[in-house]
Image (spheres, rainbow, N blue to C red):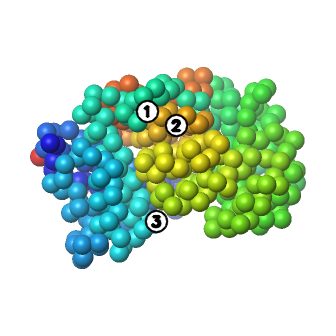
Amino acid sequence: MSRIAAVEPHPLRLPPETPGGRQEECFLLRIVTEDGREGWGEAHGSPWLCHAVVEAPVTHVTAQGLRHILLGQDAADVPALRRRMEKGTQWIGRDGVVMQAIAAAEIALWDLAGQRAGLPLARLLAAAPRSALPCYASAKVAATPEGTAVRIAAERAAGFAAHKIGWPPFGASLDGDLAFLEAARDAAAPGALLMVDAAQAFDEPTALARARAFARFDLAWLEEPLDRDDLDGQARLRAASPVPIAAGEGECGLPGLTRIARLVDVLQPDVTRCGILAALAAAPLAPRVCSHSFTTLLNVVAHAHALAAMPNGWMLEWPVRGLAMWEALFPGAARLRDGHFTLPQAAGLGLRPDPAALARHRMPSLPDPDLRVP
């Protein structure tokens, strides 16, 4: 038996690139067992709120923080601990930030499980997972088509043969969207895949009109063209669209993933929101699965292990700018070659954050946990 001895939240923030600019944030979670092993997870959500979910005192048997739920428990049975966390937080959230924090804990527990088994996580999840995955380069669209061409050319030079563009100013006008896509197509390698993240910018008629206009670019998918809750519109759009439809990143649990998986051509679970178990359970309901992995390398690696274990897993999202911004956490750890990511073969997730970088980027006004093994 390997009991949980520590549950440590690590809310992190980078300084803004320009004065007054956006401060990038992420949330890592460390779980330590009595035998000295440590597992790491990540939540894609508000670090402040995830920190609160971990640290909350007991209000009720179904309203308590994750630390209280997990401390002293045997770390061996990950599905049972996932159910325990969900039951212990029923009154404070069955979706959103609570489930995101639970996802971070679940990933950390899987990391520990792989270490105990002496296996990379993907081999714990599937008998014969893939050892490498094709990646699509992902970043928000540049301010101009010319800037987009520069970005795509740089990704092409780095070996990528799949590129995703989107978010404003993409979506503002049809002519503007076509100009962005034409610039991306001209800059990409012959035969490269393009995909568009519409960021819920359209109503149903506009989304269908855009899909028809985009058909000549042979897109791999059109991502989140509609509001996430417009499930009826999503079903109608998928039936009529000449471009495959993708969605799923906003779902924080199996019920939401199950609903959306049946309405898309490409399911995009974010395991740092929904957890690995939910992503694996929903994957067979969709024709194909790609990751939504958009912050640190730990985020990307957790998705890679899950995706490699799925028979219908397709491409891994590679957030070029995000990984560069958070590189100090995992210096020299990326394994990308010719647009493919080779999964770590060490036990568990196969990587650890740098302690000095954790301390340097910890959000202010929150207590600094003791990183020593109990």
Contact check, label 2 and label 3, Cβ < 8 Å: no
Can residue 189 be seen in this snapshot?
Answer: yes
| Residue type at the position of mark 3 | Gly
Q: Nearer the viewer, mark 3 or mark 1?
A: 1
Establish if 10 lies above or below 314: below
Secondary structure under tag 2 reads: loop
Q: Residue at x 83, y 55 (%)?
A: 240
For badge 1, the amino acid type reads Ala
Q: Residue furthest bottom?
A: 59
Give the answer, above or below, for where 131 lies relative to 371.
above
Task: Kindly state the secondary structure of the residue where label 3 is placed.
Answer: loop
Q: Secondary structure at mark 1?
A: loop
**Near-viewer residue (301 or 243):** 243
On residue 96, the disc is: 3
Residue 317 % position (x, y): 57, 40
Q: Nearer the viewer, residue 176 or 217?
A: 217
The numbered disc on residue 97 is none
Q: Position of residue 301 (x, y in %)?
A: 44, 37
Q: Position of residue 203 (x, y in %)?
A: 77, 67
Callout 1 crowding tier (Cα within 10 Å): few <14, some 14–19, many ≥20: some
The residue at 77%/61% (across/down) is 236
Q: Residue at x 56, y 56 (%)?
A: 258
Give the labeled residue for mark 2. Answer: 310
User: Disc 1 vs disc 2: Cβ atoms closer than 8 Å?
Assistant: yes
Label 3 crowd (10 A; few <14 / some 14-19 / many >=20): some
Residue carrying label 1: 126
> Which tag is nearer the camera, tag 2 or tag 3?
2
Using the rendered image of the protein, determine whether residue 364 is visible from the camera's viewpoint: no
Sooner in the amino-acid sequence: mark 2 or mark 3: 3
In front here: 166 or 3?
3
Q: Is residue 214 above or below residue 330?
A: below
Q: CA distance from mark 2 to mark 3?
A: 25 Å
